[in-house]
Image (spheres, rainbow, N blue to C red):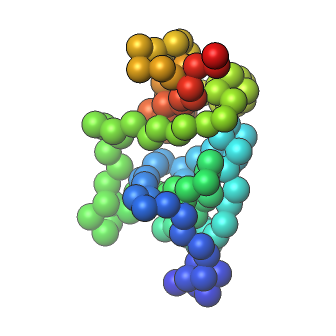
Amino acid sequence: MSEAVANAPVLGGVVPYLMVDGAIRAAGFYERAFGAVEIARQPADDQGRTMHVHLHVNGGSVMLHDPYPEYGQPLKAPQAFTLHMKVDDVEAWWRRAVDAGAEVVMPLQDMFWGDRYGQLRDPFGVIWSLGAPIPT
């Protein structure tokens, strides 16, 4: 592990570590869609894969890597989870993500629990939800 990766601050209590097909491309998408900031990256191998990208997104860390089937890590479709972000201006976050290419899964709407909430799917198959208290 490089020194830059070893010294990068990890934010948050639970840190998602996503395996996606194209971790470097995903990092670029998350920068455009969710304002992510890349903190560290291991260099790509001769096939363009990386074993580690560390991002800060909305006050927390998200980590990415490519599949390495030769090491027992084949690509599987994301399943059974949603990455949720509580944000300050949900309309602005929503527009930015959709404009970047996120697909609407559940339209942004006022929910019974008091949030304006919706769900998006990124081009890598990951479901993200955005929410903020309904303005009063």
Residue at point 62% right, 69% down? 41
Residue 124 vertical position relative to residue 39 in the rendered view, above or below: above
Figure disc tally: 0
Residue 28 vertical position relative to residue 39 in the rendered view, above or below: above
Residue at point 43% right, 61% down? 13
Residue 127 drawn at (x, y percent): 44, 33
Q: Nearer the viewer, residue 92 or 62?
A: 92
| Left or right of 72, for residue 31 | right
Q: Is residue 50 visible?
A: no
Residue 66 drawn at (x, y percent): 47, 57
Residue 64 drawn at (x, y percent): 50, 57
- Residue that extends furthest to the front in the rendered view of this protein: 136
Q: Nearer the viewer, residue 25 or 40?
A: 40
Residue at point 61% right, 59% down? 55
Residue 49 vertical position relative to residue 113 in the rendered view, above or below: below
Q: Image quadrant for the C terminus?
A: top right
Residue 96 drawn at (x, y percent): 72, 29
Residue 44 vertical position relative to residue 85 in the rendered view, above or below: below
Residue at point 56% right, 26% down? 133
